[in-house]
């Protein structure tokens, strides 16, 4: 007799379905049970407002969590960068698999790179974080660009370029990799130019905290280095009291001496969307072996950034 299928809650977008399908295959392998995708529409999917206007924090997550609470799905897959930094007691992040490429990328007309864009180039992005850092880079390098707020799925955003409405758009490398469209990238943005969103490129697999068997099974997909890194990044975001659509970038990476990993470096940035002011700092410490240690690393850097005036640069404050 075939075991009852596990129900995986997912958003309906092409990207969400692709990444959830990959997780479904992995979960089937570790549990020996079939997994069926349950498509759920979130407020963030149906609203046409820009994320900064609708609050950003949790707009792609709430409906999935409600489905979990009602028992309509057994677990859910989120893009980690969309998760609010506060975790409901009744739910647990059972697994954070190995992270995809966290970088941002450009898809531009005529296969142009960022530094090749002509004067007056219009670059589309829905992210205040990207706007702040791109405009700061342009100011520092004497570039004349205009960042244009956009929304929509990957097809819609790339369409602004192919139809000639914009010269370029900025997207996440991870998403393009997951849907097989990385060959359209014309430039990978160095994290020294644009720090990604906290948790960018990582997935979160969430289920009910009291489902001990499922929690244990999903934990087999967890990558401890990815979990430590994104925990530090999200701790920074939380300590800044910023939402996921605030102009905050963060990235934790592992430093090695060629033989073994020794330390973790956490970088953070907050800036005004026009790029006129940035607070950008970093800290380094031992690779965190506990949730508490990773959280402390993020809080430490946030404290330094707040002392440098970061609080006054964020357009959105979490409620």
Image (cartoon, rainbow, N blue to C red):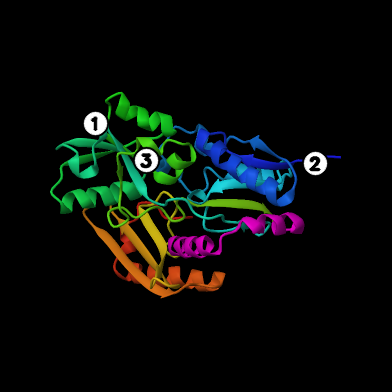
Q: Is residue 237 magenta?
A: yes
Give the extent of the magenta segment.
Answer: 210-238
Comes first in the chain, label 1 or label 2: 2
Q: Which residue is mark 2?
A: 4
Snapshot quadrant of residue 248: bottom left
Residue 88 versus residue 21 in the image, above or below: below
Tag on residue 126?
3
**Residue 253 placement (x, y as % from top left):** 41, 63
Q: Image point 66% across, 37% down: which residue? A: 37
User: Which dot, 1 or 3, sits closer to the camera?
Assistant: 1
The residue wearing badge 1 is: 110
Q: Position of residue 308 (x, y in %)?
A: 29, 68
Give residue 307's quadrant in the image. bottom left
Q: Tell me the mark number nearer the camera, choosing from 1 and 2.
A: 1
Q: What residue is at 57 percent from the left and 52 percent from the top? A: 204
Element class at badge 2: loop
Q: Nearer the viewer, mark 3 or mark 2?
A: 2
Coordinates of residue 309 in the picture (x, y in percent): 29, 65
Q: Residues within 10 Å of mark 3 (few under 14, many from 20)?
A: many
Q: For numbered disc 3, what is the local secondary structure?
A: loop
Tell me if mark 2 has few (under 14), some (14-19) or many (20+) residues whose alpha carbon lies within 10 angstroms of its own: few
Pick out the residue farthest to the right.
1
Name the magenta segment's main secondary structure.
Answer: helix
Q: In the displayed structure, would residue 150 be above or below residue 130?
A: above
Query: Who comes first in sequence, dot 1 or dot 3?
Result: 1
């Amino acid at each position: 007799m075939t075991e009852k299928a596990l129900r995986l809650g997912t958003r309906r977008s092409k990207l969400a379905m692709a990444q959830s399908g990959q997780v479904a295959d992995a979960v089937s392998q570790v549990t020996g049970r079939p997994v069926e995708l349950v498509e759920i529409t979130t407020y963030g999917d149906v609203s046409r407002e820009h994320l900064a206007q609708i609050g950003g924090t949790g707009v792609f997550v709430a409906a999935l969590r409600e489905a979990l609470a009602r028992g309509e799905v057994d677990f859910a897959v989120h893009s980690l960068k969309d998760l609010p930094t506060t975790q409901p007691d009744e739910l647990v992040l059972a697994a954070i698999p190995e992270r995809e490429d966290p970088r941002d990328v450009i898809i531009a007309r005529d296969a142009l790179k960022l530094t090749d864009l002509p004067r007056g180039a219009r670059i589309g992005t829905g992210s205040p974080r990207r706007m702040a850092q791109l405009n700061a880079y342009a100011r520092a390098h004497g570039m004349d660009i205009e960042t244009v707020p956009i929304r929509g799925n990957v097809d819609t955003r790339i369409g602004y370029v192919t139809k000639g409405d914009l010269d370029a758009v900025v997207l996440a490398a991870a998403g393009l990799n997951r849907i097989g469209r990385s060959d359209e990238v014309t430039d990978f943005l160095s994290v020294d130019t644009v720090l990604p969103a906290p948790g960018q490129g990582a997935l979160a697999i969430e289920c009910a905290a009291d489902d001990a068997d499922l929690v244990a099974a999903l934990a087999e997909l967890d990558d401890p280095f990815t979990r430590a890194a994104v925990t530090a990044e999200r701790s920074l975001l939380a300590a800044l009291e910023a939402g996921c659509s605030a102009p905050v970038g963060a990235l934790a990476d592992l430093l090695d001496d060629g033989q073994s990993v020794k330390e973790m470096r956490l970088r953070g940035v907050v800036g005004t969307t026009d790029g006129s002011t940035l607070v950008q700092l970093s800290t380094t410490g031992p690779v965190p072996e506990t949730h508490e240690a990773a959280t402390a690393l993020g809080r430490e850097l946030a404290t330094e950034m707040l002392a440098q005036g970061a609080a006054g640069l964020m357009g959105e404050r979490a409620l």
